Image (spheres, grey):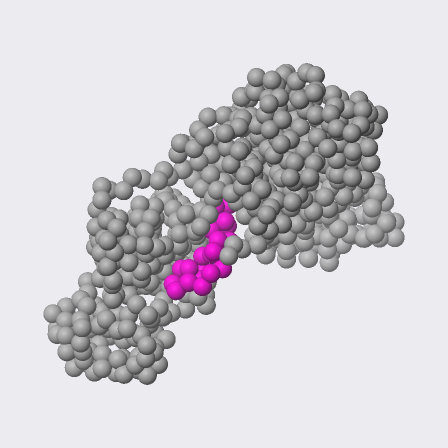
């Protein structure tokens, strides 16, 4: 679980680094795991040693040393090379042990077989942190995995913090610190970029130079033998140079810690993440609807949303949004004003805004009157405000001053016309919007003729895009970021199980279980469940229907049939005992024909549920994030509609209501076309109790209530199934024939 600390925990040999202003503090996480100490030596070292420094700048060790010198690092740089007295004009040491004076940061660029020995020298010299550039570890196969495992085992008892191995390195632009082998130095700015991919990070460095992006930190994590994405989230959250945190992730080292750390970071700064790939566990074949709908990618999505961060879908979107967040204030709401010199551009922007959830509503009459006083009669005073094709710089400036910061965000569009002076327009825009408390973005559409204006806007901190759509997407992403920061819901602690009561119902079963095993568990958590009886034969089913009262629903009980309706395993509205018996006989005959190998344990007979909306309420235990709760519209079309929302368990009531509100079919729950609304409060309470069940009972790998019938009088589960990873807590599992 994450925690944050502003103070450094300095190593005894470190010196005068406290002014760096950010790090992770030592101690323990709330669950008792040890937290290794400060990252200060990475952020603000005074002495850097390059182990494996080469006289040849084309080699990795030589390139790192050349970058340090070319960047203008003001501290002491020590090349370590056993075969040379001088390396690239600097006095060299034969080993770390031979260096005089303290060393804050070591960069290791020696062959993989020599890395552990180099780090042991670091530990002997009380070096606070190391960046291991060297590849040749787990990414290379069994031999590399063995080397990395040995390195990780040794590091567990050491104080040194290690970035890598197999990483591009680390850049702190404000300190002129570049310990990578990538050419060039990015400008200093407010974006902290953390990447699992060194190759992508190198490409982004090139891309960023052309777009005037500035970074507070540029970090490649590599194999994460020690420092991982959660460590850096903790650090940059309290880094005074960082305005926005941007990450490219391919997975997370510890899902729950990542979630807590991300939540803490997103509370104080915008965090935008791009995740690539789906884990093998998330893609595995599963037997439940819930498992099919909620793989690890949806668990990651749930964690990001619940933490208050934002997820990008493409690299371009990631940095488009970062540019806006790093340079502009967050919007107060979703009202967007568009100002353009081309009607077509304005229409495109308006369509994109509506699709992105922004509101291009018309201006009030007072604003229109002010515009009317400064614009020609041919101008359009709606939204978009069309200044028409001959608009010059003065017209743009006058229009913006007339409307002022009355919307929540403003988008300025320019397309090259015969007399367009893009630089003049840019200067007029900057003069008019200076000190506005709302975000301003631009799209200057064209080629060389609009480039001077676009460049001027970018250099002044107004993000400018080549087309309206990415500009709109950026402003929409900023609105979502603002909402998630503003509307953060309280943290819900994982509760203690209610003594052993939650487990009693599962002590005698394993594998897939069904309604009869799960009803006692639902009862413990006060989740309403429909009445019902399990009957072994058609005659017993008919008798059960008489006892329960008709009409009834009849369902096959089988551990081998997940989708009962596909094989005729569900019949509804049976009004007589004879109809029940006949339906049971026909059900058996069809199942024997279509699924002859299926084990049939009998029939579940239930009174027909009151009318309502059919929902699915499910649990999947994700390999990284633990229990994930999924709610959506259920019944037989759940996998087709895929109208679901997901969160990590346990949940609070506000989070459960937010999940329901996310569904595309949410209006149907609130009452549509004269229907009575569902009791949303009662339904949300069921979701909360189910989420606590998920957190309490680790044996449950998957579980779902489908359908969960929600109506004006509350919600009731009418069918349930689950899969247990192992036997019950008493360690003596027994077979079950129910599903």
**Residue depicted at 27% across the width and 75% down the height:** 571
Which of the pair 467/222 is nearer the observer? 222
Residue 616 at x, y = what percent?
36, 60
Most distant residue in the front direction? 83
Which of the pair 225/448 is nearer the observer? 225
Can residue 56 be found in the magenta stretch? no
Q: Would you identify the image quadrant in which residue 14 lies?
A: top right
User: Mostly what secondary structure, the magenta segment?
Assistant: helix
**Residue depicted at 22% across the width and 69% down the height:** 604
Position of 547 compared to 705: left or right?
left
Residue 327 in sight: no
Most distant residue in the right direction? 419
The C terminus lies in which quarter of the figure? Answer: bottom left
Residue 656 in sight: yes
Position of 526 compared to 117: left or right?
left
**Residue depicted at 80% across the width and 24% down the height:** 85
Residue 304 at x, y = what percent?
51, 45
**Residue depicted at 40% across the width and 37% down the height:** 491
Q: Which residues are magenta?
A: 281-304
Residue 728 at x, y = what percent?
26, 52
Q: Would you identify the image quadrant in which residue 150 lies?
A: top right
Can residue 285 be found in the magenta stretch? yes
């Amino acid at each position: 679980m994450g925690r944050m600390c502003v103070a450094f925990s300095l190593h005894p040999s470190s010196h005068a680094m406290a002014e760096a202003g950010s790090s992770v503090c030592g101690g323990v996480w709330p669950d008792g795991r040890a937290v290794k100490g400060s990252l200060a030596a990475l952020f603000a070292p005074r002495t850097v040693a390059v182990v494996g420094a080469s006289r040849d700048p084309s080699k990795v060790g030589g390139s790192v040393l050349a970058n340090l010198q070319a960047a203008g690092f003001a501290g002491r740089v020590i090349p370590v090379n056993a075969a040379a007295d001088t390396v690239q004009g600097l006095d060299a040491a034969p080993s770390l042990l031979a260096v005089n004076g303290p060393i804050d940061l070591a960069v290791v660029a020696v062959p993989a077989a020599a890395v552990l020995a180099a780090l042991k020298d670091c530990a002997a010299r009380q070096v606070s942190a190391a960046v291991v550039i060297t590849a040749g570890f787990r990414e290379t196969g069994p031999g590399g995995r063995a080397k990395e495992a040995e390195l990780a085992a040794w590091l567990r008892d050491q104080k040194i913090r290690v970035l890598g191995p197999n990483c591009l390195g680390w850049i702190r632009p404000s300190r002129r610190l570049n310990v990578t082998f990538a050419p060039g130095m990015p400008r200093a700015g407010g974006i902290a970029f953390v990447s699992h991919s060194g190759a992508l990070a190198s490409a982004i460095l090139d891309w960023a130079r052309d777009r005037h992006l500035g970074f507070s930190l540029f970090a490649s994590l590599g194999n994460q033998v020690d420092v991982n994405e959660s460590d850096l989230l903790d650090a940059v959250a309290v880094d005074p140079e960082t305005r926005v945190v941007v990450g490219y992730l391919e997975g997370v080292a510890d899902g729950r810690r990542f979630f807590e750390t991300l939540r803490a970071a997103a509370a104080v700064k915008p965090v935008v993440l791009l995740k690539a790939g789906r884990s093998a566990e998330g893609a595995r074949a599963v037997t439940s609807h819930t498992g099919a709908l909620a793989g690890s990618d949806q668990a990651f999505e749930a964690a990001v949303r619940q933490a208050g961060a934002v997820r990008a879908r493409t690299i371009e979107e990631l940095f488009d949004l970062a540019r806006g967040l790093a340079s502009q204030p967050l919007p107060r709401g979703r009202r967007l004003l568009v100002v353009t010199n081309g009607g077509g551009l304005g229409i495109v922007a308006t369509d994109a805004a509506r699709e992105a959830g922004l509101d291009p509503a018309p201006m009030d009459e007072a604003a229109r009157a002010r515009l009317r006083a400064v614009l020609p009669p041919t101008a359009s005073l709606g939204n978009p405000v069309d200044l028409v094709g001959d608009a010059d710089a003065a017209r743009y400036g006058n229009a913006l001053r007339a409307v002022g910061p009355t919307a929540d965000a403003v988008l300025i569009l320019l397309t090259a016309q015969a007399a367009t002076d893009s630089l003049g327009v840019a200067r007029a825009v900057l003069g008019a919007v200076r000190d506005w408390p709302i975000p301003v973005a631009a799209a200057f559409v064209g080629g060389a003729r609009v480039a001077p204006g676009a460049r001027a806007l970018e250099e002044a901190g107004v993000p400018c895009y080549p087309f309206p759509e990415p500009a709109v997407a950026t402003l929409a992403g900023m609105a979502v970021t603002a909402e998630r920061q503003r509307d953060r819901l309280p943290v819900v602690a994982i509760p203690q199980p209610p003594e052993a009561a939650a487990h009693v119902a599962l002590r005698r079963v394993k594998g897939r279980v069904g309604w009869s095993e799960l009803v006692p568990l639902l009862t413990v958590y006060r989740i309403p469940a429909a009445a019902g009886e399990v009957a072994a034969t058609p005659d017993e089913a008919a008798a059960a229907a008489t006892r329960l009262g008709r009409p009834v629903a009849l369902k096959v009980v089988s551990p081998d049939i997940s989708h009962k309706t596909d094989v005729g395993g569900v019949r509804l509205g049976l009004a007589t005992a004879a109809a029940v018996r006949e339906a049971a006989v026909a059900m058996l005959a069809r199942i024997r024909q279509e699924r002859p190998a299926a084990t049939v344990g009998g029939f579940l007979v239930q009174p027909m549920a009151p009318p309502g909306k059919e929902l699915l309420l499910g649990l999947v235990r994700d390999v990284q994030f633990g229990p994930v709760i999924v709610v959506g519209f259920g019944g037989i079309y759940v996998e087709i509609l895929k109208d679901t929302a997901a969160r990590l368990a346990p949940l609070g009531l506000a989070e459960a209501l937010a999940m329901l509100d996310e569904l595309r079919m949410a209006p149907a729950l609130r009452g549509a076309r004269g229907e009575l609304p569902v009791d949303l409060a009662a339904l949300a309470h069921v979701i909360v109790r189910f989420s606590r069940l998920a957190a309490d009972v680790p044996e449950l790998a998957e579980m779902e209530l489908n359908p969960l019938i929600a109506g004006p009088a509350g919600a009731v589960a009418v069918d349930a199934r689950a899969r247990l990873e192992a036997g019950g807590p008493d360690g003596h599992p027994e077979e079950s024939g129910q599903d």
